[in-house]
Amino acid sequence: MDLDPEGLFRDDSDEDDDNVQEREANKEMVIYLIDASPKMFTPATTAKADEKEETHFHTIVNCITQALKTQIIGRSHDEVAICFFNTKEKKNLQDLAGVYVYNVTDREPLDRPDARLIKEFSCIEDSFVNNIGSRYGITSGSRENTLYNALWVAQALLRKGSVKTVSKRILIFTNEDDPFGGLTGAVKTDMIRTTIQRARDAQDLGLSIELLPLSRPDEEFNMSLFYADLIGLEGDEIVEYLPSSGEKLEDMTNQLKKRMMKKRKVKTLSFAITNDVCIEAERSFICNDTGALLQNPEKRFQVYNDKIIKFSARELSDVKRVSSHHLRLLGFKPLDYLKDYHNLRPSTFIYPSDEQIFGSTRVFVAFHNSMRRLGRIALAFYGNPTRPQLVALVAQEEVTSAGGQIEPPGMHMIYLPYSDDVRYPEENFSVCQFANPALQRHYGILEALALGEDEMPDVKDETLPDEEGLARPGVLKAIEEFKASVYGENYDQEEAEAAAAKAGASKKRKAASDAAEQKSAAYNWAELADAGKLKDMTVVELKSYLTAHGLPVSGKKEALISRILTHLGK
């Protein structure tokens, strides 16, 4: 059973054709197709009197900027193009009216997100109306179809790369649910037909077309008027699409994050389900002198009750061993037995492999399906056979979207805490309520470096004590009561610390005096003084006498000798 689905660790020097092919297979080419009609510049929500109104266009710019930041931090190989339609100016290879390609010049491949693109695009709203312009692209009395033109330009931008190795997507952002509402008769019918046919031609070429609709404050976005036919939705799919449409961009951002963190195989495990099947490796011993193979392994013994009990190395190993495999199944429990606070460290994702034991996938899938169907988790021993840890295996269902796989099928191995590690928090508490401050600070630094900003974004550390809450009278009273119950009344922390420091210094002086007295007692100082040998002693030895008798130890060697002679009455 493998701990990760893609590749082994490689050095930078191992870059070869296989790596290039893997990178291309993970690559995504995205066209952000943004409606720039005057309706997009209307307020997205009803703002309060003291707040600035936020337009749909501003919302989309912010969302795409965040997605690009996520890509640049992860050094993604994805390529993007930002394309506006319903614009006064035109900029595209086909020279079609009402379509403005923002970041890709003529006959150039798509851009990889960089700091320059993010900084320029995040400020585009300020100059958009003056430099690019906004207009209604589909109007009565005109045969001009800017949406058709935009799909054509987007398809041309995605001409590079095979759909077998590269995921190609067109994401349409708009708050206009009926772009042909101002037309009537045969003209409207013909323009709807040609636009839908253009979209189907692109889809036949392997391009994915997705819509991110934006509802206006006074009107819900109606998919059935036009866009359901454009992207190929029918019946209940339309109802299911709308609630999730607002999350489409977030789904895409999560996909980019997953591609940044390349999956690596960490370890291959043996999963013991029963005792019937076991793989065992024999161990032999070699004589250090002759190099010959010892037929009889060495013995060890333990004296017990005046008897010598002999053990072989294998017997000792069996006595210590709790589990004979890396991962040993113990049983099953209902899923609700597993709590959020049991997850003390990052879980490990496991999935089956038939490389060593054929049939592993079949058994794993049977367990996986049964656990999901019955709402069960598996409990198992994991780790060193002599020091295993209890883990929970939680089956994960595959989750997909129009953009591909979001979550793979497999099991999460959650490392369960020991009983001493478990604390019982208050109700309605979840660790998910608090962001990791170190991780947020790390990403803030990466973002500032990538965008060339002088200052790092402010990061709120939600794990620090709530100073305002602790300052409330009721809380202060409770703290003082607790303090009095522990230390007693009239406790002064500064005085206590000063007294403790004084006591510590006194203990040090006493210890130094005792050591000096012991060292000084090794010499007959009167005889040394009479024989004139004090000058042959070291300064440290002289100071030991002075310290033992509470005399000053400052001055040069001659002063120390004079002080000792005076004390001896010489």
Image: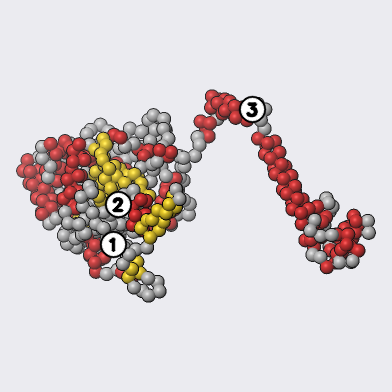
Q: Which residue corresponds to the image point at 18% horizontal and 52% vertical from the top-left? A: 361
Give the residue pinned by disc 1: 282
Give the residue pinned by disc 2: 324
Describe the element under mark 1 as helix, strand or loop: loop
Q: Amino acid at mark 1?
A: Glu
Give the residue pinned by disc 3: 488
Q: CA distance from mark 2 to mark 1?
A: 14 Å
Whether residue 337 is visible here, answered yes or no, is yes
Describe the element under mark 3 as helix, strand or loop: loop
Q: Amino acid at mark 3?
A: Gly
Q: Amino acid at mark 2?
A: Ser
Describe the element under mark 2 as helix, strand or loop: loop
Q: CA distance from mark 3 to mark 1?
A: 66 Å
Q: Which residue corresponds to the image point at 28% horizontal and 48% vertical from the top-left? A: 328
Residue 437 picture location, percent across and down: 44, 45
The residue nearer to you, when weighing 453 against 161, is 161
Of mark 2 and mark 1, the one earlier in the sequence is 1
